[in-house]
Image (spheres, helix red, strand yellow):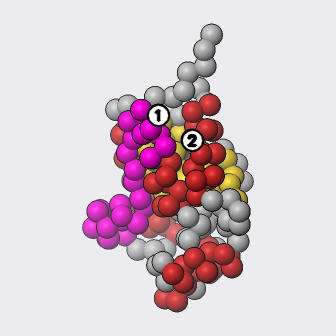
Amino acid sequence: MTKMSPSHGVIWITGYSAAGKTTVSKQVELELKKLNYKTIYLDGDELRGIFGNSWKFDKKSRIELAYIYFRLCRHLSSQGYVVIISAVAMFDELFIWVKENIPNAIQIYLKVPKDDRKERDAVTKKIFLKTDMIKNDGLYNEPKNADLLIENFGKNTMFDSANEIVNFFTSIN
């Protein structure tokens, strides 16, 4: 019997700010399209704006908004899409909900040291300059049971990370 790759599902790429979630996610989408998957890419920052920026940045508001993101992901996935979402949203209760409520959902944790993230942020969003990003890290639960942990720094390029994710996703049934 041939192992079948999932035709739909959710690939949740998470990690702290400046871990490379957006960059890797876009490459994952590109690689899956080359394999003829129907994909949709969602970015947490963009979704916040699409939904009107009406949520605060405290833990309770972030969790509430994350549930909205993942209910949307579930809906799109149920229509035959592979949804790639890049969102921090690292909360234990959300991880459990996603696993229990979304078929073929996987969580990918991009782990990057704080110094590397600070260096990246200095040339991109400059969040570290505006706020104590390390303090914000304390709002989240670092994934203990991610389906795949990728050290997205050093010699590991975005292409390496994306290929590892695509290979993992296409190998599950």
**167 left or right of 65 in image:** right
Q: Which mark is residue 49?
A: none
Q: Residue at x 53, y 39 (%)?
A: 105
Q: Which residue is mark 1?
A: 35
**52 left or right of 46 in image:** left
Q: Nearer the viewer, residue 55 or 14?
A: 14
Kindly identify the amino acid type of the residue bearing the numbered disc 1.
Leu
Q: Nearer the viewer, residue 66 or 30?
A: 30
State which quarter of the image contains the N terminus.
top right
Quadrant for residue 111, please give it.
bottom right
Q: Secondary structure at mark 2?
A: helix
Q: Which residue is mark 2?
A: 166
Q: Are marks 1 and 2 in contact (CB under 8 Å)?
A: yes
Q: Residue at x 50, y 61 (%)?
A: 23
Point out residue 156 in the picture as x, y percentages from the top left corner. 68, 59
Quick check: 108 above or below 55? above
Q: Residue at x 58, y 53 (%)?
A: 159
Point out residue 89 in the picture as x, y percentages from the top left corner. 53, 60
* Within-10-Å neighbours for mark 1: few <14, some 14–19, many 20+: few
Q: Which residues are magenta?
A: 29-55
Q: Nearer the viewer, residue 73 or 11?
A: 11
* Within-10-Å neighbours for mark 2: few <14, some 14–19, many 20+: some
Q: Secondary structure at mark 1?
A: loop
Point out residue 162 in the picture as x, y percentages from the top left corner. 57, 50
Kindly identify the amino acid type of the residue bearing the numbered disc 2.
Val
Q: CA distance from mark 1 to mark 2?
A: 10 Å
Q: Residue furthest top?
A: 1
Q: Residue at x 42, y 32 (%)?
A: 36
State which quarter of the image contains the C terminus.
top right
Mark count: 2
